[in-house]
Amino acid sequence: MAEPQDILFRTLADPTRRAIFERLCREGEQTVVALTARAGVSQPAVSKHLGILKQAGLVHDRHEGRQTHYSAEPRALAPLTDWTNQLTGFWERRFDDLENLITRMDR
Amino acid sequence: MNETANETLSVTVEREFPHPPGKVWRALTQPHLIEEWLMKNDFKPAVGHRFNLRGEWGGVLDCEVLAMEPEKSLSYNWNFTHEDAAYDLRSVVVFTLTPTSGGTHLRMEQSGFRPDQKQAYGGAKVGWRDFLTKLEEVLARAG
């Protein structure tokens, strides 16, 4: 099963997608048209990227008339950025391996 | 988060093992056993001994045994030198073993992270990108 951070990582590993997300973080809510104007790729491509970002929970969309406005959800980065949890996870996994090892040492 | 500039952070993980302290101690102090649960190493159970922990991702940690009391406690530096100060890490790991009726209670505390460190890994607006870049490198090496 993919962990939340794997999904986030895959989503943000694409430079165009990362750039779109960064712009939304920096500049706030924007339409697909506004984003396309500076993305360097076509509007369908931007829409596709936004769809993937939305699946990962990184952007939120709001429909207003014929326009869809997108905004960033930086809180979705928590699994990546909660540093203490990262390190605790590291040690928990090491302790799993330690437990496994000590059990084997019995034999 | 409102820690002051000098405040350090720490992480604690605790677990009870249904085995005597002597056995847990061996797993913490014998190089071939340390390798099985932590990382490749040239550890020696002697205060002042400098050693490296080598991660599968290619990273090398610089360590030095700071204190030890057989079957009770062990501490060493856990340092990662990086030209980017945001990744440069100075920390101390302390293992404490306590005998229990069912075996051994093991506590690990890692402390000493500087706040700017936390920023590099943490929720700050600038930090997460660096963190992703690093993850990317790690995953690429992991294949």
Image (cartoon, rainbow, N blue to C red):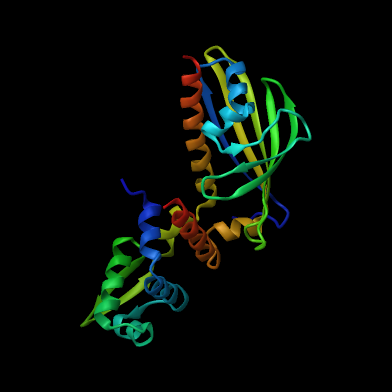
The quadrant the N terminus of chain B occupies is bottom right
Image location of residue A82, percent across then percent down: 50, 52
- Tell me what residue is drawn at x 62 percent, y 26 percent: B30
Viewer-proximal residue among A102 and A59: A102
Residue with the most extreme left position: A66
Choose top left, top right, bottom left or bottom right for residue A1.
top left
Residue with the most extreme top position: B101
Left or right of B126 on screen, residue B4: right
Q: Is residue B61 above or below residue B24?
A: below
- Tell me what residue is drawn at x 55 percent, y 45 percent: B55
Image location of residue B27, percent across then percent down: 58, 25
Choose top left, top right, bottom left or bottom right for residue A54.
bottom left
Image location of residue A25, percent across then percent down: 44, 72
Viewer-proximal residue among B126 and A62: B126
- Tell me what residue is drawn at x 79 percent, y 35 percent: B48
Image location of residue B46, percent across then percent down: 75, 29
Left or right of B110 on screen, residue A38: left
Q: Is residue B72 above or below residue A42?
A: above
Viewer-proximal residue among B129 and B36: B36
Choose top left, top right, bottom left or bottom right for residue A70.
bottom left
